[in-house]
Amino acid sequence: MPGLVSVKSPPDAPQLRITVPEPPPHNPPRTPNRKPPSPSPSRSKPSPARSAKKPPPQSPNPDDSSLDNPDLGPFLLKLARDTIASGEVTSKALDYAVRAAKSFERCSVEGEPNLDLAISSHVLAAIYCSLGRFDEAVPVLERAIQVTDVDRGSDHALAAFSGHMQLGDTYSMLGQVEKSIGCYEEGLKIQIKALGETDARVGETCRYLAEAHVQAMQFDKAEELCKKTLEIHRAHSEPASLEEAADRRLMALICEAKGDYEAALEHLVLASMAMIANGQENEVAAIDVSIGNIYMSLCRFDEAVFSYQKALTVLKSSKGDNHPSVASVFVRLADLYHRTGKLRESKSYCESALRIFAKPVPGTTAEEIAGGLTEISAIFESVDEPKEALKLLQKAMKLLEEKPGQQSTIAGIEARMGVMSYILGRYEEARNSFESAVAKLRASGERKSAFFGVVLNQLGLACVQLFKIDEAAELFEEARAILEQECGPCHQDTLGVYSNLAATYDAMGRVEDAIEILEYLLKLREEKLGIANPDFEDEKSRLAELLKEAGRSRNRKAKSLGNLMDPNSGRTKKEGTKRWGFRI
């Protein structure tokens, strides 16, 4: 039975590297170490001998008529592999792969599965991806999937699985998250059919898919898959294995995203114990940073400082004082001291981190630096220094612009740049940043996420400032529909959109629509949220003015005593708007 395996990339993954698939093996290979999502279906690294530099083979340069020779396809495919193994991913390798695929296509029987064509298509798509031509790889991989038949044995199942996973990776690099996840799900189905639901390699693919769901902020699905992965690895691995530790770290991330901090902490502690048992000091330090983050979320600041300092000691001794991982801990400490009001210490740690990012050590990725700059910008934003925050965001943006697969990250940075520009009164710049972010989020399939709804609301506010009222109304309406679905009508973000939409309708002369929204908004506050929130009086006054203008009076409903106190009354109006820089 072939090894249908898959791995997921760590956040500090190196630049994409091509790996050429070999013909399907008949013995199950071991699951390799985790590496970045590769457009190649092969999950194994080339051997050192194959990776060594050697002269590329000479081209036979056959004409198109010779492609009908059934012996030519395998020969050209070998030439393509040898050219890549020589260290060159060039037009010559691409030419060999294209000709090989054409030869296999011509020699195939129409309507019949063709395993050789599928494998050559995988190689061709991998070369396209290594050259950054992801769009051209998609139809090639779709064709590769079409010419396999999973019912014809393990080799066809492996080729079909590899094709779906490779296509998913390619969509991921294009920023099309939903399509990417769909391909991974199809690959998982094929793998389960071939190997059964409890095979260890199925667990690897479940974790791969769970991480994809985390990136898409689909945490319920990610949690379900991660639980399945844990069960599979517990059945196949020793207690406190590295596989289980990796699963628990992912589960902790999911629990943290869902606000279940205690469960996240439990998973991290168990993962740390497993890493200690396996002598993984650097991994223990990384987990200590995550534990510190959880403690900070729980406002257990002393314990958070202890975890960060513990991690800092290990990272400095093992990686050096100027390593980006050290800078990332400085950023976390800066955030902690800012939250506790120790602004001098916070600024000092920010400056230390920026010095490291300004002169990165060899091997530091652009993603690491951009992530650190983005986090520091959030601290500057919190201390009312939007200009400095905007400069850092612009630097982060520049670092990621040419990186494939970073569309969602860039969209998030652009949205924050829009917020900073709005605060500075640069409304045209804000609108441009928000529009660019919205376009990227639409393209990546995140048009139904709560974050997308918030960005639409922000873009609407920028349009209001530029007197583009009709456009603003459309954006607020779309944001309302998304946030009602994703967050519910009582969420703070949804309430903000209601208020903004009512004001926009009023400005457009649609008084009846504005009255309807404000009455609904006040009803929500009175019956479910309480009236102690400072926005209540403002909305009540606005409604009274509109009713007076329309010559109507409001129908009041009785309120229970229990609803007179707003459970969120401690959140002032200023605090409620500080996160985004707007009244939302």
Image (cartoon, rainbow, N blue to C red):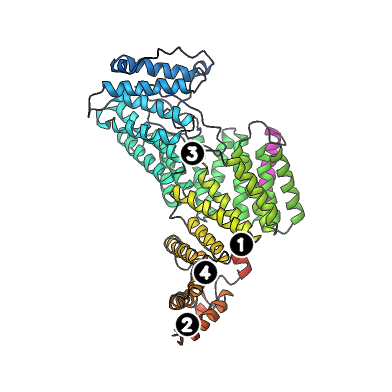
- Determine crowd level at label 1: few under 14, some 14-19, many 20+ residues with C-alpha closer than 10 A: many
Mark 3 lies on residue: 244
Nearer the observer, 510 or 335: 510
Please give the residue where the numbered disc 2 appears in the rendered image: 559
The amino acid at mark 2 is Lys
Which corner quadrant of the image does residue 184 belong to?
Answer: top left
Q: Amino acid at mark 3?
A: Glu
Work out how far the residue at label 4 is from the one at label 3, CA to CA, in angstroms: 47 Å
Secondary structure of the residue carrying numbered label 4: helix
From the image, tell me which residue sits under label 4: 500
Label 1: state its secondary structure.
loop
Residues at marks 3 and 2 touching, judged by CB atoms closer than 8 Å: no
Where residue 290 appears, as percent x and y from the top left, is 59, 46
Q: Earlier in the sequence, mark 2 or mark 4?
A: 4
Residue 302 visible from this viewpoint: no
Q: Is residue 125 magenta?
A: no
Identify residue type, mark 1: Gly
- Residues drawn in magenta: 302-322
As helix, strand or loop, the secondary structure at mark 2 comes to loop
Q: Give the total number of marks visible in the rendering.
A: 4
Q: From mark 3 to mark 1, how far is it between C-alphas?
A: 41 Å
Residue on which disc 1 sits: 581
